[in-house]
């Protein structure tokens, strides 16, 4: 077991120990009692809309392979989202490239590069939104941060698509050339990828902010800060098992400047996290009940493919927000 995984387990165990101390778990029931049906319905509807927007992002990029099968793209989105929320150490990310190959016949390197670009777009959008709405940040610093994120997001795909001679090398250089070319292809095919990503995160963060504000209770901007803190915590190289621990710590830390005590912040963040996982697992289970047609003449994923997809996906996702 690697040091990274040991730390991930330690973070999650720490959250569990805190939760069990002094019967703090009982407070979760009191928190959930603050939520009415309308608040829960709006939050669940927001998550459902965000799933649709993410599916549109995939449908846009793989429109030729999908051939009009938006339902299959939605199924891939829902199963992938459920897997990354429950499989330890972000291993659920492997579902995305494997499902793309199974249903659409997308080569594994191309699918992994697509996942990497999708996660980069997620990170850029979340960081830009965080800079815009973060409380107490000087407007000049906000503008500078947003400009820096936009400049990097503009430059990176152009660097990937620029002519290069990496393929003429050998060993690691030749392999990196294939990764760079696959990444360049992903950035080229998603025509409205930025629009779908921005819309997805706006809706998702609004749903989380509303639910968190109701749990505290506090104003919507306080809930937005907590939601952004939770998502930004996913950029950390070490993640708790299924996100437990890091998600709550990020939200609680972001709530501190608004006067929310650390213990209260951890508790409301845990309640929010459980709701997020419940929505993801429920939607993924429903999608699993409706099988989609597989691509013709597509080999069944073997153990080496699973390991390759999991390792590559973990490398991309451990630095970027989850769905």
Image: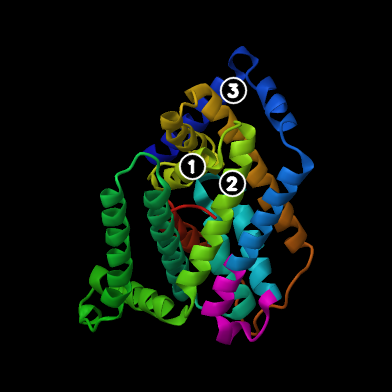
Mark count: 3
Disc 1 target residue:
230
> Residue shown at 54%/51% (left/top)?
205
Q: Residue 99, percent across and down? A: 60, 69
Q: Residue 280, percent across and down? A: 66, 52
Quarter of the image for residue 2 reads top left
Q: Residue 27, percent across and down? A: 66, 22
Disc 2 target residue:
208
Disc 3 target residue:
19
User: Quick one: 204 or 14, which is closer to the camera?
Assistant: 204
**Quadrant where the N terminus lies?**
top left
User: Quick one: 223 or 3, which is closer to the camera?
Assistant: 223
Q: Which residues are magenta?
A: 54-70
**For the residues marked 3 and 1, what is the alpha-carbon distance in whole angstroms?**
18 Å
> Residue shown at 35%/39% (left/top)?
136
Dot 2 falls on a residue whose secondary structure is helix
> Residue shown at 55%/78% (left/top)?
60
Dot 1 falls on a residue whose secondary structure is helix
Query: Of the residues under marks 3 and 1, which one precedes in the sequence?
Result: 3
Q: Residue 271, percent across and down? A: 63, 34
**Contact (Cβ within 8 Å) of mark 3 with mark 1:** no
Query: Of the residues under marks 2 and 1, which one precedes in the sequence?
Result: 2
Q: For residue 318: magenta?
A: no
Query: Which secondary structure class fits the magenta region best?
Result: helix
Query: Of the residues under marks 3 and 2, which one precedes in the sequence?
Result: 3
């Amino acid at each position: 077991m690697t040091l990274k995984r040991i730390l991930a387990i330690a973070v999650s165990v720490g959250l569990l120990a805190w939760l069990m101390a002094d019967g703090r778990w009982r407070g979760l029931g009191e928190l959930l009692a603050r939520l009415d049906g309308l608040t829960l319905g709006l939050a669940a509807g927001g998550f459902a809309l965000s799933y649709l927007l993410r599916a549109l992002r995939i449908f846009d990029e793989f429109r030729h392979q999908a051939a009009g099968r938006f339902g299959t793209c939605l199924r891939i989105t829902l199963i992938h989202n459920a897997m990354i929320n429950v499989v330890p150490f972000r291993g659920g990310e492997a579902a995305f490239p494997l499902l793309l190959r199974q249903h659409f016949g997308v080569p594994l390197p191309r699918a992994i590069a697509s996942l990497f670009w999708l996660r980069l777009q997620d990170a850029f959008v979340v960081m830009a939104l965080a800079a815009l709405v973060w409380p107490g940040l000087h407007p000049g610093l906000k503008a500078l941060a947003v400009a820096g994120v936009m400049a990097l997001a503009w430059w990176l795909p152009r660097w990937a698509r620029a002519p290069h001679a990496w393929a003429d090398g050998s060993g690691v250089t030749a392999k990196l050339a294939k990764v760079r070319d696959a990444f360049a292809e992903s950035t080229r095919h998603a025509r409205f990828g930025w629009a779908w990503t921005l819309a997805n995160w706006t809706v998702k963060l609004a749903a989380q902010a509303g639910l968190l504000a109701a749990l505290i209770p506090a104003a919507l901007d306080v809930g937005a800060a907590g939601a952004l803190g939770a998502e930004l915590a996913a950029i950390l190289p070490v993640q708790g098992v299924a996100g437990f621990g890091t998600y709550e710590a990020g939200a609680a830390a972001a709530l501190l400047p608004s006067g929310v005590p650390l213990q209260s912040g951890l508790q409301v963040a845990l309640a929010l996290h459980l709701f997020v996982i419940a929505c993801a697992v429920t939607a993924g289970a429903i999608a699993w009940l409706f099988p989609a047609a597989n691509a013709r003449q597509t080999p069944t994923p073997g153990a080496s493919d699973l390991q390759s997809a999991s390792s590559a996906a973990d490398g991309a996702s451990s630095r970027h927000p989850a769905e």
